[in-house]
Image (spheres, grey):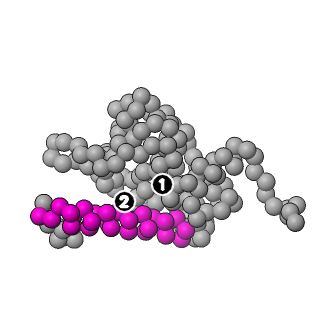
Amino acid sequence: MINPFSKTYDGEELMMFDFLQRIKFFERLRQKELMRFLPAMHHRKYVCNEVVFFSKDPSQALYLVKSGKVNLSIDIKDNFEMIMEVTHGGCFGENSLLENAKRTYTALIDSEEAELIVIPHFAIQEIFDSNPKIKAKMMTSLAEYYNGNNQRLFRSYRESFGFFSLRQMFE
C-alpha cells in the first residue's frame, strides 16, 4: 500500500537521484537523504585545459562529472603525470568530505568542454552536522574508496619492486 504522506519527487529530481546513486560516495543514501544535496549543487561548464584545482589547494568542493573528461595528475618535479581520467558519472575531489584537507592531485579538463556539478565543502559539512547518518554512510564509502586505493598502490608496488621505498609513505 502506498503511503499518502510520503514525499513524491518530480522527474528531474528522480533523474538526479539516479545519477547520484551511481557515484560511490552517494550509493548508500536514500532519496530523502540525497534530496539534502540538491540545493547545494552548482552546475558549471569548463573548457579544454582549464584547471579545476591544483595540488595542495584547499579542498573546497566535491566534483561530479555530467559530461566531458577530467585528467587527475600528480606533480613530479616540473612535470604532471596523469593518474586517472574521470568521465560521465565519475567523481573527484573526494577529500573535500574531510575537514581541513588539501588537494593531493591537480584536476584539468581534457575535453572540448565539460559540465561538472560542484558541491561546496561548507554545504557538505552543514549536511553532515545536521544529519550524522548521512555522514556515516558517506564516510564509510570514502573509507572503502581509500582502502581500494591502498590495495592498488600495494599491488603496484609489489609488481614494480625497487622503484621506490614504501617506507617513505609513512614518514
The quarter of the picture where the N terminus appears is: bottom right
SS for dot 1: helix
**Could you tell me residue 170's position as x and y percent?**
22, 71
- Left or right relative to 22: residue 80: left
- Left or right relative to 166: residue 52: right
Asked where in the image residue 149 lies, by quadrant, the reply is: bottom left
Write down the region rendered in magenta.
Answer: 136-162
The quarter of the picture where the C terminus appears is: bottom left
**Could you tell me residue 29's position as x and y percent?**
61, 63
**Could you tell me residue 80's position as x and y percent?**
23, 43
Q: Which mark is residue 101?
A: 2
**Could you tell me residue 168's position as x and y percent?**
17, 67
Determine the CA span between mark 2 and mark 1. Answer: 10 Å
Asked where in the image residue 21 lies, by quadrant, the reply is: bottom right
Q: Vertical placement of 75 versus 109: above or below? A: below
Mark 1: amino acid: His
Residue shown at the point (55%, 59%) measured from the top left: 26
